[in-house]
Amino acid sequence: MGKGQPSYTDEELLAGIRRGDDRALAHMYRQYLPTVIHLVTQNSGTEDEAKDIYQEGVMVFYEKIREGTLELSCQIKTYLYAVCRRLWLKRLAEKGRYGGRLDDHEPYLETGAEADLADAEERDRQFALMSEALVRLGEPCRSLLEGFYLLDKSMQQLTAEHGYTNADNAKNQKYKCLVRLKKLFFTQYKEEPLP
Amino acid sequence: MMTEADYYAFFDDYLNNRLEEPVRQNLERRLAADPVLAERLADYQRLTGTLTAYGQRLRLSDKLRAIQAEIDAEEEEVVETGRPEMPVMRISRTEQWLREFWHGHRATMAVAASAAVIAVFATLLGLQLWNTSNQPGSAGYAKLRLEVNQLKNARAKDRRAINQVINQLGVAAPAVQGKFSGTGFALTSDGYLVTSYHVIQGADSVLIEGRDKQRFRAEAVFSDVARDLTILKVNDRHFQGFGRLPYTVKRTQADLGEKVYTLGYPREDQVYNDGSLSARSGFQGDTGFYQISIPVNPGNSGGPVLDDRGNLIGVISGREMDVQSAAFATKSSYLARLVDSLSAAPNPHTYNLPKQNQLAGQTRPQQIRKLQDFVFVVKVFSK
């Protein structure tokens, strides 16, 4: 647990994360990590696996908050536990080591986490497709779009980096790249049957 | 003619509110009327939205990894600097692997181990039960004191606990008062009797009752726990002596195959039973006892065993459980020796053992007719 850090209530943490306050995120991360490590290590997982699972769980939670679609009917701790529990069950099933039940040390409730996880899975699929589409897009479009959307660089910066004469040129290039990306992304997207 | 890229630029401006008001209204009208255009906008939004979200995801993932790295670093710091006196533990690669294996599979191993333990104990217990239920001659031995009341009090339980191997068999006989009963017989004409030690064990008071239903109060004067013998003395002012005893106590060992019989009170009435002397040792080779083939029951304990010539050769003590007609009787030679040692003790009582045998040469019913008045019910009362 954090050294000398003030403790936050769930409401304060939620408000902080909505604002995009990284300290709130870090605090929340620290606060509930031990529970999940315990869950995973007690159920034939390693600590590293526990950290992976926990990060995945926090992402689901965080993205739901940022989307503004989180309907939290319980404590953050319980929600995270439920999500990570589900994720770990899935991981165990993939590893073929799932014995049918987990040793729960936290109350395990229906938290709506299941539905949120289904959303998150769909989102993961889209991200995977996007990543593939970006690879197939080729240079210089890939670096331009990645720079703008993924690395949060400004158009001025990208203009300088890619040697465009002015920002408008860079912008026009960006739109052309987007059109190509769109074709790649949506053909894949439509090819893949929905699960 | 606008290219798709031009449209994207246009959408970008529109979505970021960089369009002039009339242009914006014009676009919105076109979007409402033209589904192709509307879908193009939707695709654009979905594409850029996914890209933006993907970017956020990557940044979030980096953030979380950074937080985790920070936590890990703090923990390592604690290990390294927090306890400098602790030696650093180094473990080999094999041990590392073993630890990981143990960590990953300990639940499974615990289940397997428990299953093994349960299987072993179930087998052992099962075999034990099977043995006790099937094999004759194992640890079952029943003393034959008759337990009168079905309700056993705590002291009765204590008694049972003392004789763990020896199982006391209790049978209810509601018409007889008292907690337990056994059989006793006269040793001397002036009021000494013999019974089994386990009959009067734990007694607060003892009554004897003869065939004529006359009752006398009695008390134990000496007990030999190992031989399961007790000498009682009638302690009652109405008592006037047993009269002349018709049998003698045999001091030597009886022979195998000798016809023997007993009189006792396994129920309210005197019961006769006969058989042979089967062995000169008792339960599990105890040489203080004979084995006799007389069917005996709870309440027979303490009864006299006589041979054909009317010699007392033993005192009924118990039987082997689940074995037909394997009763045990304390050898009379021990009774005689006990009496001798008591006579030789300081402050001796005088034990005038019967010297003349009146039963020899008589038929069995004649013998019994003479014997029956010297055999008593011993009733034991305890708190």
Image (spheres, helix red, strand yellow):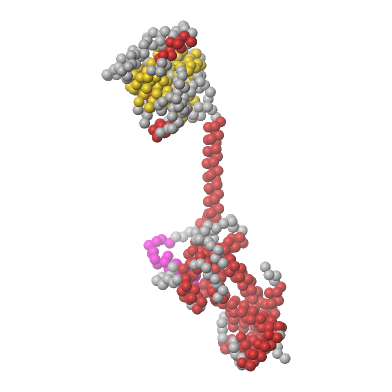
- Image position, residue B126 (x, y; %): 55, 37
Where B236 falls versus B98 (above or below)? above
Location of residue B373 (image quadrant): top left
Residue A107 visible from this viewpoint: yes
Location of residue B301 (image quadrant): top left
Residue ID at (41%, 70%): A3
- The front one of A95 and A15 is A15
Q: How many marks?
A: 0
Location of residue A158 (image quadrant): bottom right
Where does the magenta region start and end?
B67-88
* Residue A129 is inside the magenta segment: no
- The front one of B56 and B230 is B230
Residue ID at (43%, 62%): B88
Q: Is residue B280 left or right of residue A132?
A: left
Where B311 falls versus B63 (above or below)? above
Where A32 falls versus A174 (above or below)? above
Quadrant into which the C terminus of chain A falls: bottom right
Residue B342 visible from this viewpoint: no
Residue ID at (48%, 76%): A16
Residue lying furthest top: B361
- Image position, residue A38 (x, y; %): 49, 61
Q: Is residue B300 left or right of residue A193?
A: left
Q: Is residue B379 left or right of residue B140?
A: left
* Residue B78 is inside the magenta segment: yes
- The front one of B14 and B383 is B383
